Image (cartoon, rainbow, N blue to C red):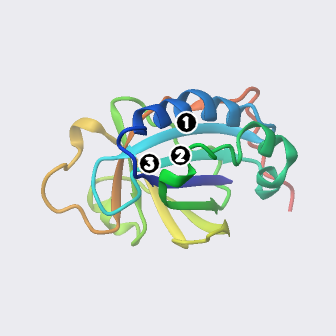
Amino acid sequence: MIYTVECSFADPHSEAEWNDFYSLEKLPALISVTGFHTSQRFRAINEGCPVYLAIHTIDGPDILTGEEYRRKGGGNFARWQQHITDWHRNLYSEIGPAPAVAADELLVLGAGGPDPLIQMGLEPLAVHAVGLERFPEHRWFAVLPRHNTPLTGDIPKEVYIYAPMTEQLVSHPLNFEKPEQ
């Protein structure tokens, strides 16, 4: 499953320190939790969406209610909580691992249908919300080479473009076998 966490941060004086905490401490702690397979963090380069996005590949919703998750990565935002705004968490359907986005690429995230991403020459990967907030119900992910990015002009309202803040962290061994039905 794909687990997303989105938020903005309202205190410019501590934002750099918070970003260091999240990228250098929280992501490595999360990827060490049994059932987390990939983790990567992004910053929006257009407006109209939460500034920060973290995308994780996990085994399922039970991971997020387990003791190991609580101990290693979930809920340790007490110091920063008062500054975190526009916070959203979602679980999306199984699609295999989340796409890894390199430093010379961008993540394009759509919530209004695949057509805007297709018109950008992309092949979007569709996901369906199955847990937590469940909004937006459908999303489309695509990876775009940075030199092809339309940073000016008309970016459709429900298309958000994110630059990677970290490399994708990967736990070992990777095992993405789908459960038997």
Left or right position of 26 against 150 = right
Amino acid on which the number 3 mark rests in the picture: Tyr
Few, some or many C-alpha atoms within 10 Å of disc 2 (few <14, some 14-19, many ≥20)? many
Image marks 1 and 3: residues in contact by CB distance under 8 Å: yes
Q: Mark 2 to mark 3: distance in Å?
A: 7 Å
Position of residue 98 measured from the top left corner of the image (x, y, whole percent): 57, 45
The image quarter in which residue 173 lies: top right
The foreground one among 14 and 171 is: 14
Q: Quadrant of the C terminus?
A: bottom right
Amino acid on which the number 1 mark rests in the picture: Tyr
Using the image, determine if residue 163 lies above or below residue 150: above
Say what secondary structure mark 2 lies in. Answer: strand
Q: Mark 1 to mark 3: distance in Å?
A: 11 Å
Say what secondary structure mark 1 lies in. Answer: helix
| Residue corresponding to mark 3 | 52
Say what secondary structure mark 3 lies in. Answer: strand
Left or right position of 87 against 152 = right
The numbered mark at residue 22 is: 1
Image marks 2 and 3: residues in contact by CB distance under 8 Å: yes
| Mark 1 vs 2, N-terminal side | 1
Image marks 1 and 2: residues in contact by CB distance under 8 Å: yes
Q: Residue at x 60, y 30 (%)?
A: 169
Q: Mark 1 to mark 2: distance in Å?
A: 10 Å
Position of residue 77 measured from the top left corner of the image (x, y, whole percent): 62, 45
| Residue corresponding to mark 2 | 54
Q: Residue at x 73, y 32 (%)?
A: 174
The foreground one among 82 and 165 is: 82
| Mark 1 vs 3, N-terminal side | 1
Amino acid on which the number 2 mark rests in the picture: Ala
The image quarter in which residue 21 lies: top right
